[in-house]
Image (spheres, rainbow, N blue to C red):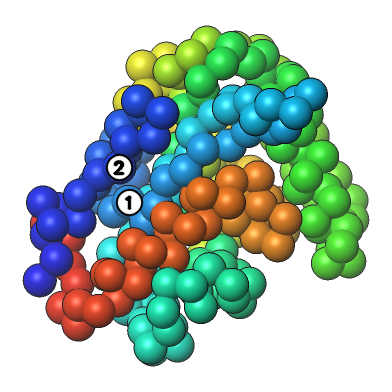
């Protein structure tokens, strides 16, 4: 049995991602699937802006295992289908994005929205409802400001709901700020992080390596 102590947390750029998170808004518990850094090459220098942790419901392991248990970590890292099965899997995901540099809400969400729109359009799914959902996403961040160590949370449900919340001290708020009902937009947020053109390759590698270990345990279960 995999317990919280054996799952272990991860530290990225001095930001701690604990092994387990419980959302006050849903009372659900999630285990840390993986964590990594997001940055950009600016004038030849890699500038780190955020760290990202992807948490998953316990059922994620039993959902992924039948198809992926026999694969090695390098094979998982190279497989876009593996990450798509995480993104589209029938289990909740809770994404915790902690800022390393001061970012304004509008500036941050502008890039997130741009990446989401590009992916949705590439799938031929961008229509009026998606455009409306993107506007809701931008509106949610409109009055936000993110100094270092503040966080944004994205909770994604299998039915396509995207719930947003914001924290000044990295903890999960008791109440969610905005709930958006649009499956393509909800999935696109995580797709831009770990999909075909990822903003965080280190997060992809962490997910593959850790989920490989978890899938070796036929009795994977987190303690609540």
Please tell me how many numbered marks the rendered image carries: 2
Looking at the rendered structure, the secondary structure element under dot 1 is: strand
Q: Is residue 64 above or below residue 70?
A: above
**Label at residue 130:** none
109 horizontally vs 9: left or right: right
- Residue at the spot 76% in from the left edge and 47% down from the top edge: 116
194 horizontally vs 169: left or right: right
Q: Are marks 2 and 1 in contact (CB under 8 Å)?
A: yes
Residue corresponding to mark 1: 32
**Label at residue 10:** 2
Say which of 39 and 17 sits in front. Answer: 39
Q: CA distance from mark 2 to mark 1?
A: 8 Å
The x, y position of residue 191, in whole percent, is 65, 56
Q: Is residue 170 above or below residue 67?
A: above
- Residue at the spot 30% in from the left edge and 76% down from the top edge: 215
The x, y position of residue 6, in whole percent, is 13, 57
Say which of 208 and 154 sits in front. Answer: 208
The x, y position of residue 203, in whole percent, is 50, 50
Looking at the rendered structure, the secondary structure element under dot 2 is: strand
Choose top left, top right, bottom left or bottom right for residue 217: bottom left
- Residue at the spot 88% in from the left edge and 58% down from the top edge: 121
221 horizontally vs 162: left or right: left
User: Is residue 105 in sight in this rendering?
Assistant: yes
Task: Report crowding for label 1: few under 14, some 14 to 19, many 20 or more residues within 10 A (C-alpha).
Answer: many
User: Is residue 159 in sight in this rendering?
Assistant: no
- Residue at the spot 72% in from the left edge and 37% down from the top edge: 112
């Amino acid at each position: 049995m995999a317990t919280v102590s054996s799952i272990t947390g991860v530290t990225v750029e001095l930001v701690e991602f604990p092994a387990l998170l419980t959302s006050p808004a849903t009372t659900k518990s999630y285990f840390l699937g993986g964590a990594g850094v997001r940055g950009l090459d600016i004038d030849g220098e890699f500038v780190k802006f955020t760290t990202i942790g992807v948490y998953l419901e316990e059922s994620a392991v039993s959902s992924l295992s039948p198809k992926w248990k026999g694969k090695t970590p390098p094979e998982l890292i190279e497989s876009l289908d593996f990450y798509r099965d995480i993104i589209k899997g029938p289990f909740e995901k809770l994404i915790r994005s902690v800022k390393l540099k001061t970012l304004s809400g509008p500036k941050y969400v502008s890039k997130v929205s741009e990446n989401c729109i590009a992916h949705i359009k590439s799938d031929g799914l961008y229509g009026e409802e998606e455009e409306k959902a993107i506007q809701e996403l931008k509106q949610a961040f409109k009055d936000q400001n993110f100094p270092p160590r503040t966080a944004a949370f994205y909770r994604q449900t299998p039915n396509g709901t995207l719930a947003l919340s914001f924290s000044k001290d990295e903890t999960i708020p008791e109440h969610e700020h905005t709930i958006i009902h649009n499956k393509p937009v909800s999935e696109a947020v995580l797709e831009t992080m770990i999909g075909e053109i990822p903003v965080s390759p280190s997060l992809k590698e962490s997910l593959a390596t850790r989920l490989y270990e978890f899938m070796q345990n036929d009795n994977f279960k987190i303690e609540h």
